[in-house]
Image (spheres, rainbow, N blue to C red):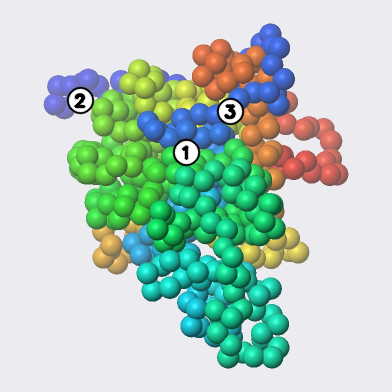
């Protein structure tokens, strides 16, 4: 017996089994489903649906504005990391929301005045990265359109000429409720590339461009909000309620309460207060047990799962705590599914097969870090080692990330002189474009759905079954007894 009369300590060694991705395989089943036809759309929070069940991790070497834009265009969700200032976060949200807008809002439209010189407007358009601008008076009434084509002859002979002399004054405008199709027809009919949007008194309220419409056509499955803007997630610390409010007001669709151990009563109290304050959906994480899920599902719009599974995470060896990811996802999903709260599996996913196994275990979507850290869209710097390109990748629990402001995620004080890290700084192979990586990832997940005979994520979660895999079975599942001469785009023997 233990000294206090409780159960013997040796009883702690009667432990339950916990499994991760390599421990299981999907059991193949009768199927009429062609993989390409499998519908991978899903819900990641109460009010946010995605065309693909993929999120990029809130890490400072994975997701900033460029990655978030790329993820949303592909139908997923990028989650901006919290190692940036509040102003930088706000600007990044705005950058994502502006990208691919059908109607560029008035405050974001570059305009010219009739009194400006063509030389000034030419410099302004080059500085702002636009090829044309509406010409407005002091009351914002649209007087004309000025473009590079209009300006060019004047630059040769009269740089001081005013815009009113060079502009096209027969302006084709549209009302605020114009559709993309109607705007495009106007442009084709009048051979123009931009249409000012005006109110009933011809005051400028926005601008539609040919470039914007074509960009939307190229990304028909993009994740968009009710206003047609790209969706974006934002990570905030559990105790940073001011930052959460700023992110919400800037237009973030989902706030991720970003903490390594969300089953902390102080974190839960703060997360609940944030959820009551903001309009955006609030996802709480990370958790890894049934009990943790029970503590948050009453107020959370989503639950994120993962205690130490990431490739650059050392939480389990430093703290001795953690939960293998398949078991963690299943335990949380047991609770969350009953409350109709989506589950996100965060970390430990090396292959597309791991991602679809996470869905089978009860997740609605998966979040990846290292998988995307090597892409062009990731902010990590490119380095070359032994003639091969890599990109910088570090855990948010690494010393460098903590010194950059990420200590709160691990409940560390900012003024700690010496951090106890729970992550490492590393390099991951350069992999090219985000689009190509997502193509392989989603395609592999659809293949898994085909083997199970499921046409949708909900059907797959209901229909799929696991089998246990031995160490010999794991070896058998990888290429063996050969020397690989040409690596496949979705498999590396070094992983």
Q: Position of residue 27 (x, y in %)?
A: 63, 15
> How far apart are the two marked residues, 2 and 3, measured between alpha carbons?
52 Å
Q: Which of the image's four quarters has the C terminus? A: top right
Which of the marked residues, 2 or 1, is nearer the chain's N terminus?
2
Q: Position of residue 281 (x, y in %)?
A: 34, 39
Q: Is residue 487 above or below residue 425?
A: above
Which of the marked residues, 1 or 3, is nearer the chain's N terminus?
3
- Visible residue check, residue 485: yes
Q: Is residue 407 above or below residue 253?
A: below
Q: Position of residue 152 (x, y in %)?
A: 69, 80
Reading the image, the residue beneath label 3 is 40
> How far apart are the two marked residues, 1 and 3, measured between alpha carbons?
18 Å
Q: Are marks 1 and 3 in contact (CB under 8 Å)?
A: no
Reading the image, the residue beneath label 2 is 2
Looking at the rendered structure, the secondary structure element under dot 2 is loop
Q: Is residue 25 above or below residue 228?
A: above
Say which of 16 and 270 sits in front: 270
Looking at the rendered structure, the secondary structure element under dot 3 is loop
Name the residue: 59% across, 81% down: 165
Rendered image quadrant of residue 12: top left
Q: Residues within 10 Å of mark 1 (few under 14, many from 20)?
A: many
Reading the image, the residue beneath label 1 is 346
> Nearer the viewer's eye, disc 1 or disc 3?
3
Which of the marked residues, 2 or 3, is nearer the chain's N terminus?
2
């Amino acid at each position: 017996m233990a000294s206090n009369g409780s159960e013997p300590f040796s009883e702690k060694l009667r432990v339950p089994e916990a499994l991760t991705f390599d421990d299981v395989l999907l059991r193949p089943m009768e199927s009429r489903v062609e993989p390409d036809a499998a519908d991978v759309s899903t819900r990641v929070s109460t009010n946010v649906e995605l065309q693909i069940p993929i999120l990029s991790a809130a890490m400072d070497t994975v997701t900033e504005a460029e990655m978030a834009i790329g993820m949303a265009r592909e139908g997923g969700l990028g989650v901006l990391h919290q190692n940036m200032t509040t102003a930088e976060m706000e600007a990044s949200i705005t950058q994502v929301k502006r990208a691919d807008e059908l109607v560029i809002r008035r405050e974001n439209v570059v305009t010219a005045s009739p009194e400006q010189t063509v030389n000034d407007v030419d410099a302004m358009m080059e500085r702002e990265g636009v090829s044309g601008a509406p010409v407005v008076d002091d009351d914002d009434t649209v007087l004309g359109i000025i473009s590079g084509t209009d300006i060019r002859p004047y630059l040769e002979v009269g740089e001081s000429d005013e815009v009113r002399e060079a502009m096209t004054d027969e302006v084709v405008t549209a009302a605020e409720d114009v559709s993309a199709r109607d705007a495009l027809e106007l442009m084709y009919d009048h051979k123009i590339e931009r249409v000012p949007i005006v109110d009933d008194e011809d005051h400028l309220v926005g601008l539609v461009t040919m470039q914007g419409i074509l960009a939307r056509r190229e990304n028909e499955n993009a994740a968009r909000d009710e206003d047609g803007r790209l969706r974006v997630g934002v990570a905030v610390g559990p105790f940073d309620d001011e930052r959460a409010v700023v992110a919400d007001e800037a237009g973030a669709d989902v706030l991720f309460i970003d903490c390594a151990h969300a089953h902390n009563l102080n974190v839960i109290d703060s997360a609940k207060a944030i959820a009551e304050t903001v309009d955006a959906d609030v996802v709480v994480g990370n958790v890894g047990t049934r009990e943790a899920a029970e503590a948050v599902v009453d107020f959370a719009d989503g639950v994120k799962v993962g205690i130490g599974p990431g490739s650059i995470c050392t939480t389990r060896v430093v703290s001795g705590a953690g939960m293998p990811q398949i078991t963690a996802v299943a335990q949380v999903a047991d609770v969350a599914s009953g409350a109709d709260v989506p589950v996100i599996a965060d970390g430990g996913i090396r292959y597309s097969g791991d991602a679809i196994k996470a869905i089978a275990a009860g997740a609605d979507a998966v979040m990846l870090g290292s998988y995307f850290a090597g892409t062009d869209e990731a902010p990590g710097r490119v380095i070359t080692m032994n003639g091969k390109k890599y990109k910088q990748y570090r855990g948010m629990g690494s010393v460098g990330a903590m010194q950059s402001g990420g200590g709160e995620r691990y409940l560390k004080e900012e003024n700690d002189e010496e951090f106890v890290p729970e992550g490492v700084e590393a390099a991951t192979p350069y992999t090219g474009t985000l689009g190509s990586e997502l193509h392989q990832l989603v395609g592999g997940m659809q293949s898994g759905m085909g083997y199970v005979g499921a046409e949708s994520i909900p059907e797959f979660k209901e229909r799929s079954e696991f089998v246990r895999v031995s160490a010999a079975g794991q070896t058998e599942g990888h290429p063996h007894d050969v020397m690989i001469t040409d690596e496949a785009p979705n498999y590396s023997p070094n992983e």
